[in-house]
């Protein structure tokens, strides 16, 4: 595996390389979820690039930028073993050569301010800005994102469509521990008691999905899950049932939905989600929508 730290070295490699590159952007702290993304890219492209860059632009002033796990040597070893061809491991000066304040920003309006964007202002602008920059440098045919960060995945898809970047933005199913907890770099922050409770987030989403499929109205599902999370010891931020394709509030005829939640356990903020397909009535309405007149 070639380790590249500068934009110039990456550009030189890129200029000589083939068209079909798969890309896995990461912030390091690698776990099984990241390695599953690499495996997917590996199976689909002759060359795989991964990046490790803890992007300061996507952390709020009170967030964990300083404490975020930085495990470069272990990450490089895992990526090499997973078959990555090039690891891009840039400094801040390579990513934001004019400084952060002068960096051209990319923002997806609306969607970036909703759900996680409500409690993390500026977070998604930081994500789309760095991902756009990385896409410009790596010029991948496809890029791989974990569906655990569902809103991020949908935002990057929107950005690519709106800007015509021509990158396929693939979402991979979430990789979970045996008790259902989604793998996340931030799981390392959980103490033993919190780690035990943490599986309650996915269990709550599964219960919520079952209620939505049995015809309960989305707002009722959200309320029920919110209460259940509180009962399990979480401080819920939100539970939302949305249309899977664009995270809009679902219309009665929408079948493919996703239930998303963010909740704190002690000081750790966890997110997770579950896609679901709810049955429609024979007349085309959803089970909870009122019957059509006539
Ligand atoms: O999901 C992440 O690790 C980050 O948000 C990403 C996509 C690498 C951008 O910094």
Image (spheres, rainbow, N blue to C red):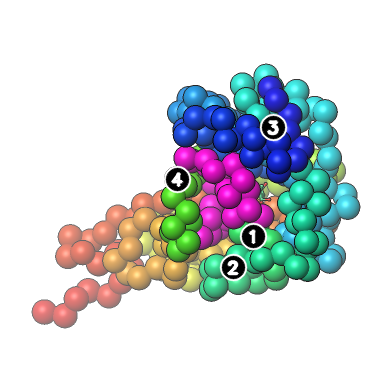
Q: What is the crowding at mark 1: few (fewer than 14 residues within 10 Å), some, or many (at least 20)?
A: many
Name which residue lies at 36% across and 62% down.
215
Q: Earlier in the sequence, mark 3 or mark 1?
A: 3
* Left or right of residue 192, residue 1 in this image: left
Query: Residue 178 appears in which quarter of the rendering?
Result: top right
Q: Separation of disc 2 and disc 4 at Cα?
A: 19 Å
Whether pointer 3 and pointer 2 mark residues with C-beta atoms closer than 8 Å, the reply is no
Name the residue tied to disc 1: 129
Whether pointer 4 and pointer 3 mark residues with C-beta atoms closer than 8 Å, the reply is no
Does the rendering let one see residue 211? Answer: no
- Which residues lie in the magenta part? 130-159
Name the residue tied to disc 4: 168
Dominant SS type (magenta): helix
Toward the viewer: 174 or 160? 160
Q: Earlier in the sequence, mark 2 or mark 4?
A: 2
Q: Quadrant of the N terminus?
A: top right
Name the residue tied to disc 3: 87
Q: Separation of disc 3 and disc 1 at Cα?
A: 20 Å
Count up the numbered dots. Answer: 4
In this rendering, the answer to whether 32 lies above or below 288 is above
* Left or right of residue 213, residue 25 in this image: right
The residue tagged with tag 1: helix, strand or loop? helix
Name the residue tied to disc 2: 107
Spot the residue most to the left.
Answer: 294
């Amino acid at each position: 595996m070639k380790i590249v730290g500068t934009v110039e070295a990456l550009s030189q490699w890129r200029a000589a390389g083939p068209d079909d590159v798969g890309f896995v952007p990461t912030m390091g702290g690698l776990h099984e979820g990241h390695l599953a993304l690499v495996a997917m890219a590996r199976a689909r492209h002759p060359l795989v690039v991964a990046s490790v860059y803890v992007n300061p632009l996507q952390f709020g002033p009170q967030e964990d930028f300083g404490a975020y796990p930085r495990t470069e040597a272990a990450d490089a070893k895992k990526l090499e073993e997973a078959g990555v061809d090039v690891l891009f491991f840039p400094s801040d000066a390579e990513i934001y050569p004019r400084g952060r304040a002068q960096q051209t920003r990319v923002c997806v309006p609306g969607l970036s301010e909703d759900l996680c964007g409500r409690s993390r202002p500026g977070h998604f602008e930081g994500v789309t800005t760095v991902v756009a920059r990385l896409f410009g440098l790596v010029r991948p045919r496809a890029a791989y994102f974990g569906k655990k960060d569902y809103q991020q995945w949908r935002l990057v898809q929107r950005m690519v469509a709106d800007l015509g970047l021509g990158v396929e933005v693939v979402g991979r199913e979430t990789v979970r521990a045996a008790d259902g907890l989604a793998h996340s770099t931030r799981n390392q922050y959980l103490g033993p008691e919190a780690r035990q409770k943490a599986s309650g987030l996915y269990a709550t989403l599964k219960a919520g999905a079952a209620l939505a499929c049995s015809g309960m109205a989305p707002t009722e599902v959200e309320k029920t899950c919110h209460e259940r999370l509180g009962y399990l010891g979480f401080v819920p931020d939100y539970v939302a049932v949305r249309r899977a394709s664009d995270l809009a509030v679902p219309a009665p005829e929408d079948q493919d939905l996703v239930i998303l939640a963010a909740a704190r356990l002690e000081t750790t903020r966890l997110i997770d989600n579950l896609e679901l397909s709810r049955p429609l009535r024979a007349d085309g309405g959803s089970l909870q929508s009122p019957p059509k007149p006539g």
